[in-house]
Amino acid sequence: MVKHYIIMSSSYTDGTRVALDITEVSLLNREEIALIIKEIRKSCGKDVPLSTHLIETESASWTSVKEFDPFFEDVECTRSVTEFSEKISKGRILSGLDVANYILSKTQCTHLSLEKLVYFAYADYLCKHSKRLFVDKIYAFDYGPVVESVYEAFKRSGSQYVKSWGSDVDSSIHAGVKELPIRSRILFAEDGAEKLLSIDKTIEKYGKYPASTLVAFTHRSGTPWSHVDRSKQYQIISDELIVKYHHVECV
């Protein structure tokens, strides 16, 4: 019989559960397993959700694991800590679109109001925690800050209310990507609980305002947006500008 020590998490990028299957006898002891988990947490974040399982099958193959227990049927197996960590780490990084989808699950938005709410969520989090909420670039457009992935997903929506991706709006952009529970997507990110709490506070603070009012906030004299040269297209609003001047656009 072969022992399998299985460490599992989820890849939100691939939309699947991922396992690290350890069968090498020299690694199947408490000290080595602790070192492997420590390495995973170092790469993926100390708060990365992990589950562990110990089973015995007749061979070292992953097929034998799936035959032993259907629970593992749709799990993608990896054999190295590096491969496992890379798959998990990619899914722990948020995009602006992830935040936009969560906001749309909480309140109705036009494309314009959604852009502003996602931007305010980013700015609020950055200023409080000195960390980025998501990886997107933020541009200074005529109607205020625009978040890269949100703009690409909803730019053809006009003034109508928009729906989260995967429903009716520009779904071709996301072909092949599996939709996952929106709240869980935020929680799975690094510092996910902290990020979710911050986003909720932003929605509570700004979600009641129409797009025109949100635009007016970002257009005040001295805001991060106002400090960008908008004579050229796709000029980035830097984190430095946001940290220094976000207080000007706050309610």
Image (cartoon, grey):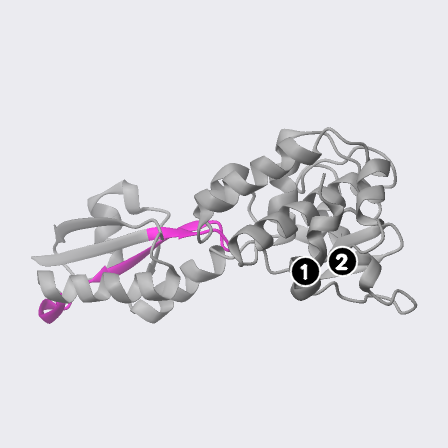
- Helix, strand or loop status at disc 2: loop
Residue pointed to by mark 2: 224
Q: Residue at x 19, y 46 (%)?
A: 68
Query: Position of 117 compared to 226: left or right?
Result: left
Can you say whether 70 is above or below 94 in the image? above
Q: Residue at x 54, y 58 (%)?
A: 130
Can you say whether 29 is above or below 188 in the image? below
The three-letter amino acid code for the residue at tag 1 is Lys
Can you say whether 232 is above or below 164 in the image? below
Region in magenta: 9-27
Q: Determine which of the numbered discs, if any, sits on residue 151 in the image.
A: none
Tell me whether circle 2 and circle 1 mark residues in contact (CB < 8 Å): yes
Residue pointed to by mark 1: 244
The three-letter amino acid code for the residue at tag 2 is Pro
Instruction: Give how far apart the Cα atoms at labels 2 and 1 are.
Output: 8 Å
Residue 24 quadrant: bottom left
Neighbor class of circle 1 (other Cα within 10 Å; few <14, some 14-19, many 20+) is few
Please report whichever mark, 2 or 1, sits nearer to the chain's N-terminal start: 2
- Mark 2 vs mark 1: in front: 1
Residue 1: x percent and y percent?
7, 57
Residue 112: x percent and y percent?
81, 42
Q: Nearer the viewer, residue 19 or 116?
A: 116
Q: Is residue 14 magenta?
A: yes
